[in-house]
Amino acid sequence: MVADRSSERSFEPRSDLVACAFDDRPSRSGHVINVWTACGSLTVEDVQYATRVRLSINGQATSAWSVTGFEISVSRYARAGTCVVRAVRSSEESDALAALLRATAFVDRTTVLLEVSASLTSEWTTIFQGVVDHIELEPLTSSLILECRDYLALLIDLRVASSWLNMTGAELAEAAILEAGLIPGVEFTAAMVGQFWQIDHRRTSAVAASRFQSAYDLVLSVASSFGCELYAMGRKVMCVPIVLEALDPGTVGNVQMEFSSASTGADFCVRHISVARDLVNTSGLSVQMLSWDSRQRSKGEVSVQGGSVVQSATRNSAAFHSFRMPGLREDDLQRVAIEKYNALSAHEYVVRVEGPANTSIGARSFLRLGGTGTAWDRVYSVDQCIYRFDSQEGFTQAMTLRDRSGALA
């Protein structure tokens, strides 16, 4: 459907604000995408309100229902992406969604595919894929609401019932993903983990109410301990090292575009931008990791302070954080301490941006902020991206950006 553009809208965008997005996985793609620029002659309504939406259930487009709105949230926050779709009945013909409403029993999970198109002639772009968790119907108004999660939901809903022995972290992650019926995208090397986890998992399960209640808990713990993140790209579950910063654009010959009045040309208009800084983190962030080995009757301690690994951190700071994990060797302990430090240090600088949607930009993309003349002028990672669509506001996008340039490798 095409949103109604007949009514006049009063907001005037800042044409002097522009931005640039870098590729979401620069370490593997090796290039930079210039997707945000100043408004120029392109009107906000052309970008924001001429959007069509197509909904497919179990692989079939819903011809009898029209999407009136949706909200999609994807992030780096160790959770599945979510989507809430609102639709109304537009005809009496039977389609996949009507069949879903008549079904009394379900053998397989109901799948959902949401696509958008910028105009009547543009190609369809997939913006969300996953499974339907909940459906709510309003018979009097012939409207419904679908609550969905991306395919990471299949890993979350798979309970751990198998043992694991003599497997590397990558093999363990791949086995769990395959068991959930998904495609593994595991791209890291790791040492043996099964023989240690078998003992410590059993010993701590009663106290911790079972640390690994689902396959997702298990794989996420493996990924985090090796500096990786876990997320879904369609039916493929990625378990890859965290990209901390974008490639230097100068090495690939692309022009950098910034939130700056000096930049020109653009196809994205910023409607709102705010910047924030956590002053507690500036006072000296330090992370302490403690571990013990019940078999060897030994304990270990590794700390990260001021961007360096130290034996013992200063504890009289408000930014001191201490964590405990059983059964980790010293090299594993140091890797986890660095991962915790990187996650905490990213909260010092935060930028929030809103504007007409651009599907080329999503979680794990990179943006450069410049021209403010403040400490916020730097490269940021997109930590959360929320796409919204309705007939009043059109297709919009809100993002939370954090600085990961101070992270340790």
Image (cartoon, rainbow, N blue to C red):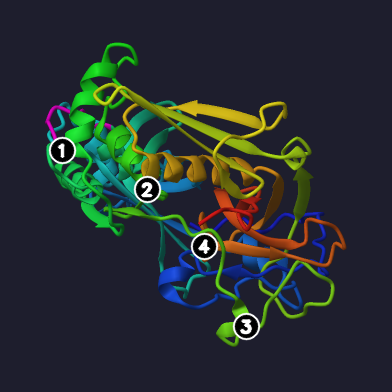
Q: Nearer the viewer, mark 3 or mark 2?
A: 2
As helix, strand or loop, the secondary structure at mark 3 comes to helix
* Residues at marks 4 and 3 touching, judged by CB atoms closer than 8 Å: no
Q: Position of residue 309 (x, y in %)?
A: 55, 46
> Which mark is first along the chain, 2 or 1?
1
First of labels 4, 3 by sequence position: 3
**Does 206 sit above or below residue 382?**
above
Viewer-nearest of labels 2 and 4? 2
Give the amino acid type for the residue marked by disc 1 in the picture: Asp
In the rendered structure, which amino acid carries the disc numbered 4?
A: Thr
For the residue marked with disc 3, what is the amino acid?
A: Gly
Q: On the rendered structure, is 167 left or right of 67?
A: left
Residue 212 position, x and y percent, is: 28, 27
Is residue 83 visible in the rendered image? The answer is: no
Q: Is residue 359 left or right of residue 198?
A: right
- Our reading of the magenta stretch's main secondary structure is loop
Q: Earlier in the sequence, mark 2 or mark 4?
A: 2
Give the distance between the C-alpha atoms of the residues marked 1 and 4, in whole angstroms: 30 Å
Q: Which numbered disc covers residue 359?
A: 4
The Cα–Cα distance between marks 3 and 2, rounded to whole angstroms, is 30 Å
Work out whether mark 3 precedes mark 2 in sequence or the reverse, and give the earlier one: 2
Instruction: Specify start and end residues of the magenta stretch as a single range.
Output: 157-164
Which of the 4 image quarters holds residue 98? top left
Question: Mark 1 highlights which residue?
Answer: 108
Say what secondary structure mark 4 lies in: loop
Say if mark 3 contacts mark 1, CB within 8 Å: no
Horizontal side, residue 232 vs residue 271: left or right: left
